[in-house]
């Protein structure tokens, strides 16, 4: 039997995920545990929280309203315990290992870690920047951030933001070559390409309806996304960039978005931690503050 707080926490995770199996993975529990918790809540409220089929689950309108209220209630409860839980400052000391993509770590994690360092100077950070999923055991990683997918069951992951991908180019590039009118037309235009260091191959570009292409006319290749942004800004070619890298330049008129009607579904930004072992107060503090900031569209652009 779960208490009501545990039921609401399980429900909030289930409301954020496409299936009870995915929710169970993030919770480090079984799908049956999630199903049982949702059934208990439905019995208590006398309302269905999800429409279920053999293929997927879809949250109901009542479930949406309840999830919003539950998140607020749980956040208030967490804040109450943080303020009055009697944590000793000596518990908030020691190393926190963090992994993140290069551009995400520099832009978004460092400001949050700087805030924590000012308030808790005995916490020490070890941040490893890589665009690949970092081995948590080998690198002694307590927390990580990743964009895309996390299928490894060794991790508990939580989605914090939706990241659209945009095809962009400079106004000068569009004046010289025109805007691409289709994915086939894109093959005839100069583009940039990002190399996957794991395979040595170029990452494919993603588009609507599951379409993937590798532009045939890449005039600039790099394994660093920040470097790719600079190449796109220099007018070398069109690039497909996450919105948080493109948005400041779009707003300033340095870049123009094209092929908007072919945009893929947004990718998810996750914060993850290893399944095994207890979570120390210092790691929990860093985790919760990262979730708070990375979930804020004013902090991480989400379109």
Image: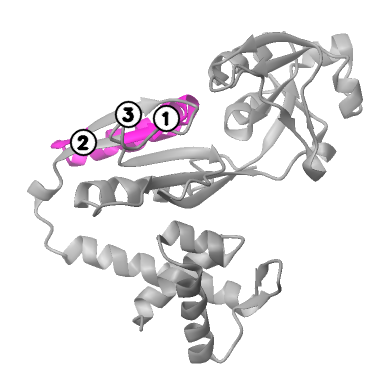
Q: Give the range drawn in magenta.
A: 98-124
Q: Can residue 69 be seen in this view?
A: no
Badge 1 marks a residue whose secondary structure is helix
Question: Are there few (<14), some (14-19), or many (20+) residues within 10 Å of tag 2?
Answer: few
Is 136 drawn above or below residue 213 in the view shown? below
Residue 118 marker: 2
- Separation (CA) of disc 1 from disc 2: 18 Å
Query: Which residue does the image show at 46% across and 34% down from the upper left?
Result: 133
Residue 127 marker: 3
Is residue 119 one of those drawn in magenta? yes
Is 68 drawn above or below residue 263 in the view shown? below
Badge 3 marks a residue whose secondary structure is strand
Is 62 drawn above or below residue 118 in the view shown? below
- In screen coordinates, is 237 left or right of 116? right
**Residue 261 in the image: x percent, y percent?**
84, 39
Q: Please identify the quadrant where the C terminus is shown.
A: top right
- In screen coordinates, is 38 left or right of 236? left
Badge 2 marks a residue whose secondary structure is helix
Q: Can residue 247 be seen in this view?
A: yes
């Amino acid at each position: 039997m779960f208490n009501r707080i545990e039921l609401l926490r399980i429900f909030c995770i289930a409301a954020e995920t496409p299936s009870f199996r995915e929710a169970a993975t993030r919770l480090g529990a079984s799908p049956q545990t999630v199903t049982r918790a949702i059934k208990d809540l439905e019995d208590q409220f006398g309302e269905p929280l999800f429409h279920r089929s053999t293929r997927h689950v879809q949250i109901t309108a009542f479930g949406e309203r309840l999830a919003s209220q539950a998140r607020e209630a749980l956040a208030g409860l967490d804040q109450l315990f943080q303020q009055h839980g009697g944590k000793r400052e000596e518990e908030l000391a020691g190393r926190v290992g963090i992994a993140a993509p290069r551009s995400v770590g520099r832009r978004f994690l460092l400001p949050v870690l700087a805030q924590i360092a000012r308030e808790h100077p005995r916490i020490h950070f070890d941040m490893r920047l890589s665009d690949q999923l970092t081995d948590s055991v080998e690198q002694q990683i307590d927390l990580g951030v990743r964009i895309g997918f996390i299928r490894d069951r060794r991790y508990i992951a939580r989605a914090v933001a939706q990241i659209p991908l945009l095809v962009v180019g400079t106004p000068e590039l569009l004046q010289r070559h025109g805007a691409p009118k289709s994915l086939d037309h894109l093959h005839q235009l100069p583009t940039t390409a990002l190399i996957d260091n794991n395979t040595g191959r170029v990452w494919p570009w993603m588009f609507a309806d599951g379409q993937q292409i590798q532009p045939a006319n890449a005039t600039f290749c790099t394994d660093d996304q920040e470097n790719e942004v600079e190449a796109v800004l220099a007018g070398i070619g069109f690039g497909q960039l996450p919105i948080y890298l493109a948005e400041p330049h779009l707003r300033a008129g340095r870049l123009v978005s094209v092929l908007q009607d072919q945009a893929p579904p947004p990718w998810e930004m996750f914060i993850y931690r290893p399944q095994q072992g207890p979570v120390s107060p210092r790691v929990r503090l860093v985790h919760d503050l990262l979730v708070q900031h990375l979930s804020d569209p004013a902090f991480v652009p989400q379109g």
